[in-house]
Image (tube, rainbow, N blue to C red):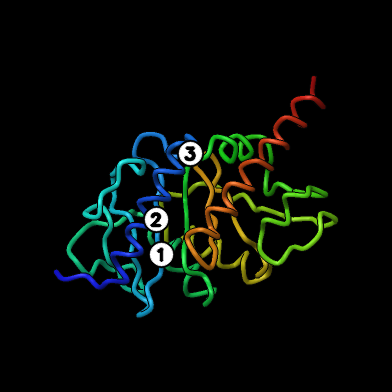
Amino acid sequence: MSYSTDFYTAAQELIAAGQFIDRKGWVPATSGNFSARLPDNTCAITVSGKHKGQLTPSDIMLIDALGQSLDGKTPSAETLLHTHLYQRYPTTQAVLHPHCLSATLISKLWSDAVVLEDYELLKALPGITTHATQVRIPIFANDQDIARLAQQVDRYLDQHPATCAYIIAGHGIYTWGNSVAAALRHLEALDFLFECELRLHRVKNQ
């Protein structure tokens, strides 16, 4: 099929994001999935089963607002988790889901959420202007039934609309932003903050 200029621009941004995230070690094997919303409310999203540090334009596909393929390619099984975020947040233009080691370990040590408090780097997250704040990142149990998991996330976000990310236990993190660059900034900040919490946890439990 013929893709729009907007699609190709988004594809290049996702490819670059994949290379950056891979250099950080956040997408081992073929893990993770990334997407970007287009002006017509369709989405460019990574196809299933490709290494995210080695993406090419053919590894980016087009889906509609409900997550249905528009070009015959196969998206990730977790596509609904992307489209639900786009439906909920009109300003969201990108969703990133890597399998960061820090987030995976956090989910094994904390139960329902990790609370980040009094860190200067919290100002890298949307709407935060001071370190003197508290950010709660929820942790959801992993579930192979993605529709059910998406509904669970939706119920939480109904009550906590300012949430900027969530973790799936033993799996990875979802974060989003008003551009691919913004979502990357959130991701990098959260990875650093998770590492801070892990090191503090280790010291406290020595």
Q: What's the CA distance linking mark 1 and mark 3?
A: 19 Å
Give coordinates of residue 124: x percent, y percent: 67, 56
| Badge nearest the viewer, 1 or 2 | 1
Give coordinates of residue 177: x percent, y percent: 54, 64
Name the foreground residue: 28 vs 106: 28
Q: What's the CA distance linking mark 1 and mark 2?
A: 14 Å
Q: Residue at x 25, y 66 (%)?
A: 69
Which kind of residue does numbered mark 2 sit on?
Answer: Glu
Which kind of residue does numbered mark 3 sit on?
Answer: Trp
Q: Are marks 1 and 2 in contact (CB under 8 Å)?
A: no
Name the foreground residue: 79 vs 54: 54
Give coordinates of residue 52: x percent, y percent: 35, 44
Q: Which mark, by number, is residue 61? A: none
Which image quadrant: the N terminus?
bottom left
- Mark before the other along the chain sequence, 3 or 2: 3
Q: Secondary structure at mark 3?
A: loop
Residue furthest bottom as drawn: 40
Which kind of residue does numbered mark 1 sit on?
Answer: Ala
Q: Secondary structure at mark 1?
A: strand
Q: Secondary structure at mark 2?
A: loop
Q: Quadrant of residue 10?
A: bottom left
Which image quadrant: the C terminus?
top right
Give coordinates of residue 159: x percent, y percent: 68, 70
Q: What's the CA distance linking mark 3 and mark 2?
A: 17 Å
Judging by the rendered image, the residue that carries numbered circle 3 is 26
Q: Residue at x 70, y 46 (%)?
A: 114
Judging by the rendered image, the residue that carries numbered circle 1 is 36
Residue density around tag 2, few if under 14, some if 14–19, many if 20 or more, within 10 Å = some
Judging by the rendered image, the residue that carries numbered circle 2 is 78
